[in-house]
Image (cartoon, rainbow, N blue to C red):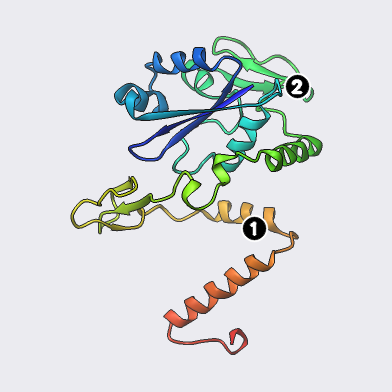
Amino acid sequence: MDTYRATNTLNGRFYIGSTVNFEKRKKQHLNNNSPYPFHRALQENPDVFIWEVWVDESQEREMEQALLDMWFGKGQCYNLSPRAGGGWQAWVEGQTWINNGECEKYLKRDQVLPDGWEKGRLPFSIEFGKELSERLKDWEDNPFRKKGEESMSHGRKWVTTPEKDQEKYLKPGEKPPEGWISGRMKRPPRSAESRERTRQALKGKPKSESHKHNLREATLRYYANQGKIRQKDL
């Protein structure tokens, strides 16, 4: 399986995918005029995209899924689906994933949900999740975890207007527009339901020493900004 990344050099955003025939899949992307954000950007400026490919001996999409687990939902990731193989086709054509507890498939727009089936995809088994983690550890040329100058984000930074209503990802050496400052746009605060889901997901999990250190430093900064330091934090 060929796992690939198409990176927009204007803003640093990228699309992650996998295929058994990269050249054919690349042509499909380039000829696709759907309203999908990645394809829209590709149609506007195809020459600014850099395509990188990593060959994996597996015939499944494990590597793509592992990378989506790391990056889906973050600002620099174009992908609209958190699952490998569930991208633009379902989004544009109105298809959706369904499963019966043992297998999964696409349900087309004009099809009726079969008895015993429900919408959604099958969850990963614990064994499969461990396998993905091990495969990532063995991938020495993983570009998403490189440090320093080898990192895909080296030399880049986000800048925003003072009002924080616009933002831009600067390329290495690029100067920000006049009056812009470092940072990103304002986002609406997380809902109470979202915070509660995060709390429940982290409940009972041991914190690493680095995590404890970061929490302590954040607490100290907060109380220092308030003009007071709690005795137990000293």
Q: Give the percent coordinates (x, y) of residue 86.
A: 58, 24
What is the quadrant of residue 125 in the picture? top right
Report the front residue among 44 and 142.
142
* Kind of residue at badge 2: Asn
Q: Residue furthest top?
A: 110
Q: Residue at x 24, y 56 (%)?
A: 180
Q: Give the percent coordinates (x, y) of residue 198.
A: 62, 54
Q: Give the percent coordinates (x, y) of residue 74.
A: 49, 44
Q: Residue furthest bottom?
A: 231
Is disc 2 in contact with disc 1, using a CB cutoff of under 8 Å? no
In the picture, the disc for residue 57 is: none
* Kind of residue at badge 1: Arg
Q: Residue at x 21, y 51 (%)?
A: 177
Q: Quadrant of the C terminus?
A: bottom right
Report the front residue among 120 and 24.
24
Mark 2 surroundings: few (<14), some (14-19) or many (≥20) residues within 10 A: some
Residue 65 relative to residue 220: left or right? right
In the picture, the disc for residue 199 is: 1
SS of the residue under disc 1 = helix
Q: Is residue 221 above or below residue 76?
A: below
Q: Give the percent coordinates (x, y) of residue 179.
A: 20, 57
Residue 167 relative to residue 214: left or right? left
Residue 44 relative to residue 112: left or right? left
Report the front residue among 174 and 197.
174
Q: Which residue is mark 2?
A: 100
CA gap, disc 2 to disc 1?
30 Å
Q: Is residue 144 above or below residue 124?
A: below
